Amino acid sequence: MRTSWRYLVGRGWQALLVLWAAFTVSFLILYALPSDPVSIMLNQSGEQTTVNQQQVAALRAQYHLDEPLVVQYGIALWHAVQLDFGNSIQSGEPVSRALADALPKTAALALVSLGVALVVGVGLALAASLTRLRWLRDVLLGLPAIAVSLPTFWVGLLLLQWFSFGWHWFPAMGNQGLASLVLPTLTLAIPTSAVIAQVLARSLAATWRLPFVDALRAKGLSPLRVLLVHVLHNAVIPILSLSGVIVGSLLAGSVVTETVFSREGVGRLAQAAVSTQDIPVVQGVVVLAALIFIGVNLLVDLLYPLLDPRIGATR
Amino acid sequence: MKHLSVPLLALLLTACGDPQGSVTAVDVSKPQAGGTLRVALDGDPQCVDPQQAGNNTALNVGRQLVDSLTDQDPVTGAIVPWLAQSWEVSPDSRRFTFVLRQGATFSDGTAVDAAAVKANLEGVVALGARSILGSTYLAGLKHIDTPDSHTVVVEFEQPNAQFLQATSTMTLGLFSAQTLALPPGDRCQGQLIGSGPFVLKSFVHNQVVSLKRRDDYNWGSSLAAHTGKAWLDGIEFLIIPESGVRLGSLASGQVDVNTGVAPQDEGVIDSQGLVLLTRANPGVVYNLALNESTQLFADINVRQALNKAIDRAELQRIISRYQKPATALLASSTPLYRDLSSLLAYDPEGARKLLEDAGWKPGADGVRVKAGERLSFRLDYWQQTPILELVQQQLKGVGIELRLNKSTISQVTAIQASGDYSVRFLNLTRADPDVLRTVYDVAGYNINNRQPGEVDRLLRESAETLDNARRQVLIDQASELLLRDGHAIALVELATVLAHAKNVHGLHYEASSRLQFFDTWLQP
């Protein structure tokens, strides 16, 4: 652990580079799109706008949309460095406040979903590894493939149809109370648990064939104990490597899930901002997402040596 | 109460629906106070300040927060008293003198007086392009005088007859000085102090806008069915983007009103015992506006041929049954609307003859050609509508090729701004015939890129008078010219369709087909 400070500083620079790249690429993409957020705002009713051109020009100037690309980028970057993403062009709300309002809602949904996905995914993989019935194992291992191919959108609507509209067990919309979290959590957890189950089942099977397992079995340990204590410990590394992907899919899934269940959150915010080309909001969301990825990946890298000392030694 | 019109009462009663059915019959003429109405909106209002807002969800929220100087009867189109008990307009329609009723206050306790009206109108002008609708209403504002605390004199540089109707809109609704002092962005987020029957309690983006009743409210519009405060304790506008979820939530009693009914859901709503409430949007109907600076549409024969090639009766088969084909350039719910369907008759032979006369001969693939050029043009649009494909088919029938390019709102806006378009597809909601001048006047938006002509004179004269008989003549003539000369190819009327539960009563559209909840009540 002598090198850990140096290591962290190095990672810090990497993180800054990633943030800058995410900011710059998203800025360029938004800039390259035709039209601009002001025209979209003026046409938001879907009807003919009758605002005269001088007034439109004045409004565009306020957002520096009339400046050349370099100047616009410079202004945006300068403010972003100071963690000021400005105000949403569509709603006038400060981006930082919009993110601060939305993030806890999405975080709650994503974390609970991740928890459920872990329980279901790991449970499924373990059950498939433990069962001696070949047909049952085939069925269990087939479930993730089916679950992954179900569109989140459709699953959400189906759950709503049964549990909310049909049986009135859970509310169809909103962020209020635990009950409103149940159906969105399920919707979001299904594909994630499938990925976890698939990867873990394969990894368990591979680990199960390693020689140390035979040694442990020869010492008289029960298959259950070998599986839960020794094999699982060794097989979990691929899941950890997938963390970035899983977090990514949870964030991406939140766009659809929050829309179907009418929830407030980062996904809805991002979706609306992209469709209205609301540059400050999109930039805020992109930087936030990049930060989350950086954080998760750093955490994973720090966890590897703890789970498997061999990884630390080779660094 | 004495202003309550019989047609309005009829509207209220039809809104109550069939008293038979799952709900036990009660006396629906006896409204009951209490309850919170849950209203599903199809999108985030973004900015709930009605002075700035352009989209209907925001305007529907904003309408409940503010009162206006006047109100407009949705049936007759007449302008009637609200915060202004009377008014006078100078013969040249430049000076408007309003006498305010006394006793009305904003929810911070300050008086709705002449100074407040002046500050609000000047504030809308200062908002510039941010006041998406208001900037047109107040164009040419010269100055505002307040000879005493309840008299306001508004003067314009030019005759501005439409201003009287504009004072009835939520866009020119009034806020207290405290609100006007705030930056526009803060106002968008709901820091709004109006004099309306409801006050804003909270606004959470993509989630909910909560309104609470104001208990000391006692200055409802002369159109209202009752005096005093609103019946409802409050209103929750829930933002539900998915149409299927809105429908399911209404059917399962999780919301009371669904303001965004998708056409495919209309049948289900009927069968679920819910009530549909529909009204045509006043203003300019969906139409194709031709760019006459292009060589193709500089030719009046081609424009007229387009008009004759369209079979509007056939359009009815694919649109919602609550929507109607256009019978004029103005929708049937617009004041001073007149049926001009004789100018919109389907006449494919006439269209073919016009094109032949203009030198467009049938080509090898059925599309006409002239001097090696095909009779073909592109339409970029973003609107959700099934009719354009059918229009495309109909035009093809006379040898005109319409190339449809469905795109995003941002791309279409960019193309229109660049001027590189042959035709535009548009509509514009407003409960005043002046909307024609806004869109087609050469000195205004000039959507046709036209040279000045007789139409412009008629439109401008129509803006100079509030004499309805005179205005009717001018609007009729202008509409006829716009249609006959093929400046605008009128297609279908837009209709607003909402659905509500059977226990919701007294819900109705105001003149611009947005919602007014003052008289709405819930049957327990």
Image (tube, rainbow, N blue to C red):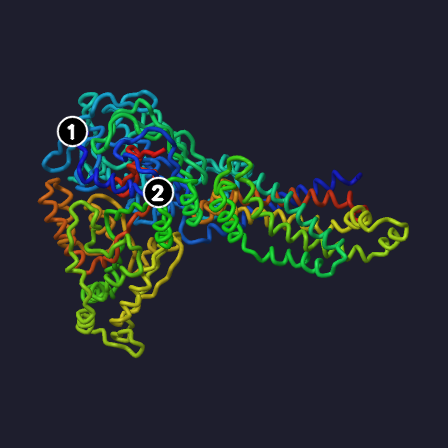
Left or right of residue A238, residue B390 in this image: left
In the image, residue B314 sits, relative to residue A260, either above or below, namely below
Identify which residue is drawn at 60% across, 52% down.
Answer: A191
Which image quadrant: the N terminus of chain B?
Answer: top left
**Quadrant in which the C terminus of chain B is drawn:** top left
In the rendering, which numbered label is found on residue B86? 1
What percent of the width, then of the height, locates residue B502?
A: 34, 41
Chain to which the residue tagged by mark 2 belongs = B
Q: Position of residue B237 (x, y in %)?
A: 40, 37
Q: Residues within 10 Å of mark 1 (few under 14, many from 20)?
A: some
SS assignment at label 1: strand
Q: Amino acid at mark 1?
A: Ser
Q: Amino acid at mark 2?
A: His
The part of the image, by quadrant, that contains residue B317 is bottom left
In the rendered image, residue A283, in percent from the top left (x then y), is placed at: 51, 44
Asked if badges 1 and 2 are on one and the same chain, I answer yes
Closest to the observer, B438 or A81: B438
Q: Nearer the viewer, residue B271 or B399?
A: B271
Across and down, in percent, residue A264 comes to 49, 40
Q: Give the labeled residue for mark 2.
A: B500
Q: What is the chain letter for disc 1?
A: B
